[in-house]
Structures are given as structure tokens and as C-alpha cells.
């Protein structure tokens, strides 16, 4: 396909592009199923290298197009505007490419390694942006350090190397950046008409690390029967961290009282009497009876009861609180979640009444079992039941 190098030297850039297109057509015409899948790995490496080389050459030409005002004859006001119109590029990426092309002009080592296909556009752009930030402090030595790193690591790790280099060369600059990131922190919490909450936030490095560390400690590796997605587990983890703060009683008082989840419920609802209304949570829309029953089940949250028969419910048990001695005995007996195969420790569990206290069940240890939050839900919202069996209880799915 290719002629001798002498002849190739005479090709115009349009002819070179035509030949590259012909070669790509040849690749695209190959029946991949006739080739071993393993060989695609080598192709990936080789083609990505070519992709980088093409991008480097594109930027080299963009630089001359920009400084020589090659765009002016078309009426465009800048190379960036021309790219947006003629190459259908987004504003940001057109501006980024022009900027990187300008920087590469004064970064000979980076430009050469990029042209050789030694790293991607993303690597080259990171080095170019660093040079822009560092200005005169980006000497040949600093560039060599970054080019060497870029050839070895992915962009994320290159970013870390860049951060350390910047910290050496301009500690005030990185501190200024950190302060800027801190200033941009926010946490939006919105609620839809359905009562669903949306959280959307941005944290600086330290704030994010605190949240992540707390979540990681709560999000143990998933159990075999845990079919929640990572995102669901993270959401549960966040609620769990907050719940513990509420349960721990360390939070400041509000209106003279320790903050606590408030459930307001009619006795009829808690006893699931037909025709009863929903229960209510502070800050949230009405909740179904079964969620109120679960929240009340452990007795950590004492519901505010309404209804003529409230005294009868209270009479069913000596108190709506599991006595501390019973709770200690329950923890000593069950040690953790009693669901088969679950190893959640006792600190992460709720006390579940086999017969709910609202239905007249007692707070005797024989009527109580420890379940983690996920498994406790199964016996309320999930419709699972417990049946007496030889040597214990069986959990029966709905
Ligand atoms: Zn329960
Ligand atoms: Zn469990």
C-alpha cells in the first residue's frame, strides 16, 4: 500500500489523510470473528498509540492555524469559534484544545512524547494546564518529571504527581486552590411532592474524606444474600450514620429536647385496624402503618399515640420501652442479627417483637429477636413471617 519513503515525502497533507483513511477502511473491513479475541489487546495498544499521535499532530496544526489566524478567511473571530462551527465541537472542548495547543508550543518534551504516542490527550492536557498555572516555575526539570510520570501512570495518578510537584514549587498556589474548593462546598436537600428526598452536594477534599471514611466503616462488604446495589448500600449507610447520631444522644438539644425521629400514629393504625389512616413522620409525608410498626417495634423510637384506645395498648405491656436488663440479655443471647447467614453485630440491630407490642405482645426476651435494619424490614414492609420450628424459628418469605 505505502510507496517508498521518497515518494511519501512528496505527499500533501490531503494525500496523507486519504491514505490514512484507506488504511482505516482496511481495518474496518476485517472480519474480527476470524481473528483470536486475544489479538484485539495488541490492536488496542497500537491503535490508541496511533490515536495519540494523530491528536498530537492535529494540535500541532491547530497551533499554527491559531497563531497564523488561518480561521480569519472564513469570517470566524477565533480558532475556538471556528472549531465550534466547522468541527461541531462543544465550547469547552474547543477552548481546551486551543489552550493545550498553545501551551505545548513551550513544552518540547511533552509535545515530543505525545507525538510519539507515549501518552493520551488527557495526560498532555494535564501537563499543559500545570504549565499554565506554574508559569515561569515550570522549568525543563519539572517538565521532565511529569513527562516521565505520564508515560507510566493513568491520568488520575498523574494528577496526584502534579499536585505534589505544585506543592513543592508553589505551596501558596495549592493552598489557594484548596481554599477555593472549600468555598464551593454545598449540600442541597430537596423534596419532591411525593415526599422523596434528593441530596446533591459538593465537598472539599477533607470534608469528602470524612464522609467517605464514615460511610466505608458502615458499609461492610455485602453478605451473599445482599442484593442491594452499591448506591443503595451507600444510601443505607448514610441513614445509618445519622440514625446512630440520633440514637447516641450526643447531638445538641432542639427546643429543650434531644433530637429524635418523631412518629405520630393513631392506635388504630399501629394495630392495623381496617380503615385506619397513615402515620406521620416529622419532615416527611405520611408513611404506611407497617413502617410505623417497624419504627415502634424496637422501642428506641417511642411513637406519639392518638386514639381513644391508647390506654389499652399501653395496658398490653407494662411499658412501651424494652427494659434495659431485657435488652442486655437479648444482646447477650443473640449477639447480632438472627437472620440465617447474617453476621451484623448487635450494635447494628433492632429488637424485633415476634408478636408486636401494639398487638399485645410482651417485652419478654422470648418474644424478642435481634435483626439488622435490612432484615428487620423484611418482617415488616417485606411481609416475611416467623414460624416456630424444631430447634428455633424459620423465616418464611411472603
Ligand atoms: Zn419488628
Ligand atoms: Zn441481618
Image (spheres, rainbow, N blue to C red):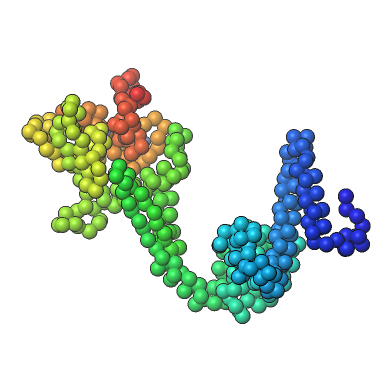
Name the foreground residue: 251 vs 82. Answer: 82
| Relative horizontal placement of residue 159, taking residue 277 as reference (left or right) | right
Residue 256 seen in render: yes
Q: Is residue 19 above or below residue 220?
A: below
Q: Quadrant of residue 355?
A: top left
Q: Position of residue 320 (x, y in %)?
A: 15, 38
Q: Quadrant of residue 14?
A: bottom right
| Relative horizontal placement of residue 15, taking residue 151 as reference (left or right) | right
| Relative horizontal placement of residue 391, taking residue 265 as reference (left or right) | right
Query: Could you tell me which residue is drawn at 33 percent across and 53 percent down?
Result: 189
Q: Is residue 74 above or below residue 213?
A: below
Q: Position of residue 265 (x, y in %)?
A: 17, 38
Residue 155 seen in render: no
Number of marks in picture: 0
Quadrant where the image shows the C terminus: top left
Name the foreground residue: 247 vs 326. Answer: 247
Query: Could you tell me which residue is drawn at 15 percent across and 35 percent down?
Result: 266
- Which quadrant does ligand 2 occupy? top left
**Residue situated furthest bottom in the rendering:** 136
Q: Quadrant of residue 286?
A: top left
Query: Could you tell me which residue is drawn at 60 percent across and 58 percent down?
Result: 89
Q: Is residue 227 above or below residue 119?
A: above
Query: Could you tell me which residue is drawn at 19 percent across and 57 percent down?
Result: 254
Name the foreground residue: 273 vs 389. Answer: 273
Q: Position of residue 180 (x, y in %)?
A: 44, 70
Q: Position of residue 226 (x, y in %)?
A: 44, 36
Amino acid at each position: 500500500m505505502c510507496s517508498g519513503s521518497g515518494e511519501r515525502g512528496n505527499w500533501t497533507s490531503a494525500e496523507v489523510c486519504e491514505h490514512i483513511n484507506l488504511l482505516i477502511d482496511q481495518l474496518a473491513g476485517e472480519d474480527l470473528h476470524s481473528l483470536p479475541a486475544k489479538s484485539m489487546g495488541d490492536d488496542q495498544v497500537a491503535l490508541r498509540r496511533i490515536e495519540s499521535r494523530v491528536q498530537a499532530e492535529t494540535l500541532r496544526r491547530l497551533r499554527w492555524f491559531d497563531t497564523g489566524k488561518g480561521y480569519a478567511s472564513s469570517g470566524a473571530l477565533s480558532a475556538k469559534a471556528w472549531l465550534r462551527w466547522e468541527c461541531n465541537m462543544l465550547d469547552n472542548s474547543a477552548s481546551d484544545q486551543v489552550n493545550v495547543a498553545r501551551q505545548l508550543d513551550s513544552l518540547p518534551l511533552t509535545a515530543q512524547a505525545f507525538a510519539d504516542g507515549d501518552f493520551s490527550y488527557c495526560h498532555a492536557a494535564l501537563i499543559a494546564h500545570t504549565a499554565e498555572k506554574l508559569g515561569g516555575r515550570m522549568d525543563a526539570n519539572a517538565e521532565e518529571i511529569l513527562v516521565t510520570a505520564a508515560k507510566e501512570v493513568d491520568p488520575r495518578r498523574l494528577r496526584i504527581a502534579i499536585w505534589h510537584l505544585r506543592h513543592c514549587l508553589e505551596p501558596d498556589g495549592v493552598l489557594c486552590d484548596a481554599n477555593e474548593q472549600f468555598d464551593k462546598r454545598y449540600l442541597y436537600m430537596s423534596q419532591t411532592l411525593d415526599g422523596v428526598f434528593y441530596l446533591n452536594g459538593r465537598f472539599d477534599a477533607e470534608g469528602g474524606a470524612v464522609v467517605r471514611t464514615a460511610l466505608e466503616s458502615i458499609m461492610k462488604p455485602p453478605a451473599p444474600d445482599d442484593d442491594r446495589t452499591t448506591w443503595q448500600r451507600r444510601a443505607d449507610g448514610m441513614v445509618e450514620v445519622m440514625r446512630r447520631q440520633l440514637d447516641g444522644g450526643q447531638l445538641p438539644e432542639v427546643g429543650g429536647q434531644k433530637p429524635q425521629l418523631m412518629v405520630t400514629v393513631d392506635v388504630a393504625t399501629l394495630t392495623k385496624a381496617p380503615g385506619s389512616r397513615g402515620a406521620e413522620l416529622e419532615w416527611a409525608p405520611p408513611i404506611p402503618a407497617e413502617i410505623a410498626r417497624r419504627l415502634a417495634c424496637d422501642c428506641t423510637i417511642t411513637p406519639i399515640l392518638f386514639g381513644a384506645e391508647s390506654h389499652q395498648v399501653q395496658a398490653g405491656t407494662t411499658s412501651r420501652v424494652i427494659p434495659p436488663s431485657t435488652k442486655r440479655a437479648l444482646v447477650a443471647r443473640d449477639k447480632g442479627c438472627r437472620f440465617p447467614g447474617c453476621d451484623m453485630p448487635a450494635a447494628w440491630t433492632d429488637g424485633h417483637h415476634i408478636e408486636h407490642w401494639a398487638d399485645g405482645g410482651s417485652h419478654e426476651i422470648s418474644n424478642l429477636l435481634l435483626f439488622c435494619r435490612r432484615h428487620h424490614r423484611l418482617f415488616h414492609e417485606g411481609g416475611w413471617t416467623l414460624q416456630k420450628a424444631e430447634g428455633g424459628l424459620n423465616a418464611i418469605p411472603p
